[in-house]
Image: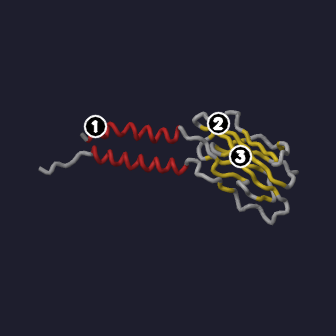
Amino acid sequence: MRARLAAAVAPAITALLVGSTAGAHSTLVSSCPGETDVVNQLDRIELTFGSDIVDDGQALVALAGDEGRTDIEIGPATFVDERTLAATVPPALEPGRYIIRYMVTSIDGDLSDGGFEFTFDPDAAQDAPGCGEVDGDGGGATGWVLLGVGVVAVTGIGLLLRPRRSTA
């Protein structure tokens, strides 16, 4: 009975664990500048995602002024590592609110895109403290919970299948 239960449960747990990482979409988890930050200098935009992104030539980082201003020419999107994308910003940025837009390909092949606003004010007292976190966990917490459930389930199956000493 225990062997049949373990044989039925093990594939489901494996599919759950593998599916939770393989089907993960890349969600923005932090950025510099951060969402709603007020910065007094900006020479680079850096975006970090909660899962790996693919360098397939489609990655995009764009900067635009709000209120209908045109796109601002920035450097091309470059990969810092498997989860981080960056682009350089020209030094002659005008004071005002700006919108950062991005598009990346997740490891599952799906495109993820989004954007957020920040303010550039060269007269601001100081830069925002470090890079800002974006609301949400990028699927990171969900992945850790699923991993924990999987570890508990595998441990339970191992305990069910372990040989028992006979008491006779």
Figure quadrant of the N terminus: top left
Q: Name the spot of residue 112 as percent of width and height, x first.
A: 65, 39
Who's the residue at 69% across and 44% down the image? 114
Of mark 1 and mark 2, the one earlier in the sequence is: 1
Type of amino acid at the residue the image marks with label 2: Leu
Q: CA distance from mark 1 to mark 2?
A: 41 Å
Task: Report the Cα–Cα distance between label 3 and label 1.
Answer: 50 Å
Element class at badge 2: strand
Q: Is residue 14 above or below residue 140?
A: above
**Mark 3 highlights which residue?**
115
Q: In this figure, which residue is indicated by the disc labeled 1?
A: 4
Front in this rendered view, residue 125 or 96? 96
Residue 75: quarter of image: top right
Residue extending furthest toward the bottom: 125
> Which amino acid, mark 3?
Gly
- Compared across the picture, whether 16 is left or right of 165 comes to right
Q: Secondary structure at mark 1?
A: helix
Question: On the image, numbered disc 2 is attached to which residue?
Answer: 111
What kind of residue is marked 1? Arg
Using a 10 Å C-alpha cutoff, classify the residue at mark 1 as few (fewer than 14 neighbours), some (14 to 19) or many (20 or more): few
Identify the residue shown where x is 37% and y is 45%.
Answer: 154
Please tell me in which quadrant of the rendered image residue 127 appears: bottom right
Return the x and y of residue 10 as percentages of the image width and height: 36, 39
Can you tell which mark lies on residue 164?
A: none
Residue 148 shown left or right of residue 7 in the figure: right
Number of labels in the image equals 3
Give the alpha-carbon distance from disc 3 to disc 2, as whole Å: 14 Å
